[in-house]
Image (cartoon, rainbow, N blue to C red):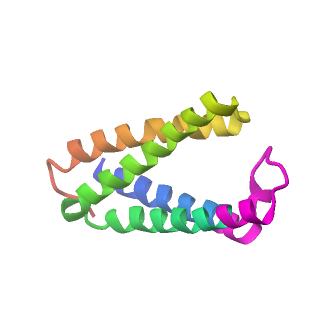
Amino acid sequence: MNWLFTWFTRLFGSVCILIALGHIAIGPDIIPGGVSVNATMDSEDRFYASLFLGFGGAVIWTSFNFSDRGNLFLALMGIFFLGGLARIVSIISVGWPTPLFIFLGALELLIPPVCWWLLKTTTKNDTFN
């Protein structure tokens, strides 16, 4: 189970990095169901993508030593969960997004608690690779 969790975490971080690189390279046009934006919104999208790239890199980095970096990993999962909560604020404020983003919001709310449980369960053995 430990190796599976480690590799899931690395895959998760890599997907975050790939999404971020897409936003940096292509901009908001990469968003399915998106609309044309002005230069200010384009700049914001690419800026926040650079932070998501760093997030993905940090998630991968924590996976190499959960024993020492587990608390940082949990903090990162808390930030990811907060992103899911922010989507709920958006739904309340302006309505439902496309189905893809409903799915992504669900992942943002489900992955962190599952990762918290797996980290707490698997670090009892303290045998990560």
Residue 28 position, x and y percent, is 75, 58
Q: Residue 109 appears at what percent x and percent y? A: 46, 36
Residue at the farthest right position: 36
Q: Residue furthest bottom?
A: 25
Which image quarter: residue 121?
Answer: top left
Q: Is residue 118 above or below residue 23?
A: above
Classify residue 10 as left or right of residue 100: left
Depth check: give the residue in front, 40 or 10: 40
As drawn, is 36 to the left or to the right of 8? right
Expressed as whole percent of the image width and height from the top left, the position of residue 16 reads 54, 59
Q: In the drawing, does residue 6 fall left or right of residue 37?
A: left
Relative to 101, is 80 on the left or the right?
left
- Residue at 55% x, 33% y is 88
Q: Quadrant of residue 68?
A: bottom left
Quarter of the figure that contains the C terminus: bottom left
Q: Is residue 102 above or below residue 57?
A: above
Out of 51 and 37, give the one closest to the viewer: 37
Please name the predominant secondary structure of the magenta segment in the image: helix
Q: Is residue 108 magenta?
A: no
Nearer the observer, 99 or 28:
28
Q: Give the residues drawn in magenta, as a range.
A: 21-44
Residue ID at (36%, 69%)? 61
Q: Position of residue 113 (x, y in %)?
A: 35, 38
Residue appearing at x 36%, y 38% in the figure: 114
Q: Is residue 29 magenta?
A: yes
Instruction: Out of 113 and 119, give the one closest to the viewer.
Output: 113
Residue sitting at x 56%, y 58%: 15
Vertical comparison of 25 with 81: above or below: below
Q: Count the marks.
A: 0
